[in-house]
Image (spheres, rainbow, N blue to C red):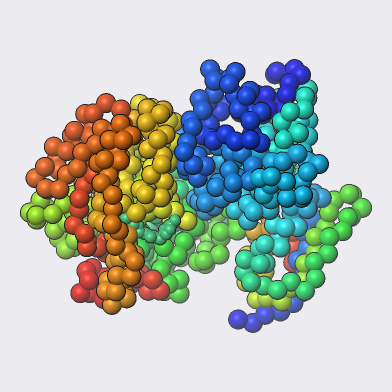
Amino acid sequence: MIRKKVRGTEALLLSLIAEGTDTIFGYPGGTIMPFYDDLYHYSDQINHILVRHEQGAVHAAEGYARSTGKAGVCIATAGPGATNFVTGIADAMLDSTPLICITAQVNADKLGTNFFQEADTIGITLPITKWSYQITGADEIPQVMAKAFYIARSGRPGPVVISVAKNAQVETTDFAYDQAELLKDLVSKDKRAAADGASEEEIARAASAINAAERPLIIAGQGVTISGAENELAELARRGNIPVATTLLGISCIPSADPLYVGKVGMHGNIAPNKMTQEADLIIAAGMRFSDRVTGETHGYAPKARIIHIEIDRAEVNKNIRADLPLIGDAKNILARLNRAGIESRPREEWFGFARKEAEAEYERIIAPELSGGGKRIRMGQVIDRITKAACDEAIIVTDVGQNQMFAARYARFKNKRSWITSGGLGTMGFGLPAAIGAKTGNPDRNVVAILGDGGFQMNIQELGTVMQSGIGVKIVLLNNTYLGMVRQWQELFFGKRYSFTHLDNPDFQQILAAYRIPARKVTDPQELEEAVSWLFSTDGPAFLEAAVLEEENVFPMIPAGATLDDIIYDKYDK
Amino acid sequence: METQKFVVTAVGKNRLEILNRIASLYLQRNIPVESFILSKDRDGNSRYKICAQAPESSIIKIVNQINNIVDISKVDYSI
Ligand SMILES: Cc1ncc(C[n+]2csc(CCOP(=O)(O)OP(=O)(O)O)c2C)c(N)n1
Ligand SMILES: [Mg+2]
């Protein structure tokens, strides 16, 4: 334990180090200057990545957090620095990502005076944070930071905002960091007891429901990744011979090639797991929250199934979908207990046969035509497929939002956990590039590929500067269809093909990349795609590949907004 | 949906932030609050008491979400 007399900002830095922080993403400014002044002396212990916009810092911290399992840390100045954080914080809240967002604030005695660069950061971010705190005295720093890290990481993780008044940064304080001591009054006892979760009896009831089921389906969400329950999930599936689907955020918690894996559920998910949801007599939902993108219209969801809901956040249980057997607790703990509760295997030949038949139908009707190299134009799915192949299914794939994201979700394959990072709940365009920067920073030895659309790329295109200056070896793939493709798809299907403000006149991206001194290529001919992809991976450091893809391609299958999972559409003539 | 008057009572630390977080849960769901009382109990904890007309299913969800607020130790509802 360290104990010494320090300035508030040094106390902040020492707290971060004591919590294991090795990287922070940030942007300086007037009110946060004392912190940056101390950071100058700590650059051997903390790697600071200078972003180009504070939104980029938050998304980078998210990419870092979700790929490493550690809390991501980002820092900004008061006022506009803090307000630029807002989108990223909201994104992290919806996707349960542990973040420590530190923002400066004006002197405590000037609060509420509309002082230069004063914004009510705490007030603005209250509904989109798991916890927040305004530090007005340096003495508070160690305790608040210990609490911040604990809250961000524990239970269902989330973002925490710490707003540090200028005077607290410059005052001196006695610094001591004894985590256990600092956290001792954190959670009241009865609340902690309640969080302990499912009783033995509930576990036993769930186990017998599983053993009695003829057509069970596991749906795994990001909770499995967050709790590190990948092995326990696989064990339950093996023991019971139960097919496993994932949600969009659950992707990569089970290897794509696992024989029990049946694909992704949801709006653009695979046909088999969506239809299996409707046919199942038991759904075992693990660490997922039945988002509307997963369920479609809820009244028609899983009509034949009893539902076991394994969930750490009690507020999610029975919120969207009825849970017949809620099992409250950490997914790893609950799954391990289920595995010890006598799960029996069954052949389930018909059930797996159903899955196979639907998967084959999807392959023939949708996948094969999209992936075959026959056409004159590059298809988005082909790009993803070739990239996945070239990376031997071992890359971390980070996406933006839109068609690029959905094609990536459909065609990327994974061997390793924590390899899929996408903005699910908030669907934040502009997420991809900075999140990939964060993921690469946390995983310097892995291939990290950003899959971007031409719209979303331009929402945080300034982060190319971060890539250049910090030499971050991300592989950037731009699927350029000259459209806000996903919106255009909806216009085509549901708004009489009126393309209202979805076409983009784009700049010459190659010139932009050249200006940033990042190796770049453009590919237009499907015949040249494979070679271009191998160039991407064989180039040292960052590299950029732009694929000029078929402009008006659509993502299918699709469950239209307001429809149930029974109403899958397979192509544009099918609605 | 059938609505009814419900009183939600939460106990926790005395932090104005909590008041704001609770209010925003009602605001988010567009449920008008009839009264909102913040008082101190004998143990020095703060008691947040909110009365609002809403469907019970919404109140249950709000109660669960209030329970998620850090520094809230207890929450319940009654008619
Ligand atoms: C910040 C933000 N603004 C608007 C949207 C709505 N939106 C969702 S997808 C999309 C189109 C994305 O276009 P592009 O980045 O080119 O990707 P594509 O769908 O063409 O692959 C839009 C505008 C959003 N998700 N996020
Ligand atoms: Mg596009």
Instruction: Specify whether residue A334 is in view.
Output: no
The one of A383 and B69 positioned closer to us in this rendering: A383
User: Residue at (77%, 49%) from the top-left corner?
Assistant: A113
Q: Relative to A514, does residue A288 appear above or below in the rendering?
A: below
User: Residue at (70%, 18%) from the top-left corner?
Assistant: A2
Give the percent coordinates (x, y) of residue A117. Answer: 66, 45
Q: Relative to A217, does residue A168 appear above or below in the rendering?
A: above
- The quadrant the N terminus of chain A occupies is top right
The one of A79 and A320 positioned closer to us in this rendering: A79
User: Residue at (31%, 45%) from the top-left corner?
Assistant: A451
The one of A320 and A476 positioned closer to us in this rendering: A476
Q: Give the quarter of the image for residue A446.
A: top left
Classify residue A285 as left or right of residue B61.
Answer: left
Give the percent coordinates (x, y) of residue A54. Answer: 52, 42
State ligand 1's quadrant.
bottom left
User: Residue at (74%, 54%) from the top-left corner?
Assistant: B18
Classify residue A329 as left or right of residue B44.
Answer: left
Instruction: Specify whether residue B44 is in view.
Output: yes
Classify residue B51 as left or right of residue A238.
Answer: right
Q: Relative to A200, does residue A172 appear above or below in the rendering?
A: above
Classify residue A279 as left or right of residue A529.
Answer: right
Give the percent coordinates (x, y) of residue A176. Answer: 74, 23
- Residue projecting furthest to the right: B42
Q: Give the quarter of the image for residue A413.
A: top left
- The quadrant the C terminus of chain A occupies is bottom left
The one of A63 and B78 positioned closer to us in this rendering: A63
Give the percent coordinates (x, y) of residue A126. Answer: 65, 53
Q: Relative to A344, does residue A104 appear above or below in the rendering?
A: above
Q: Give the quarter of the image for residue A154.
A: top right
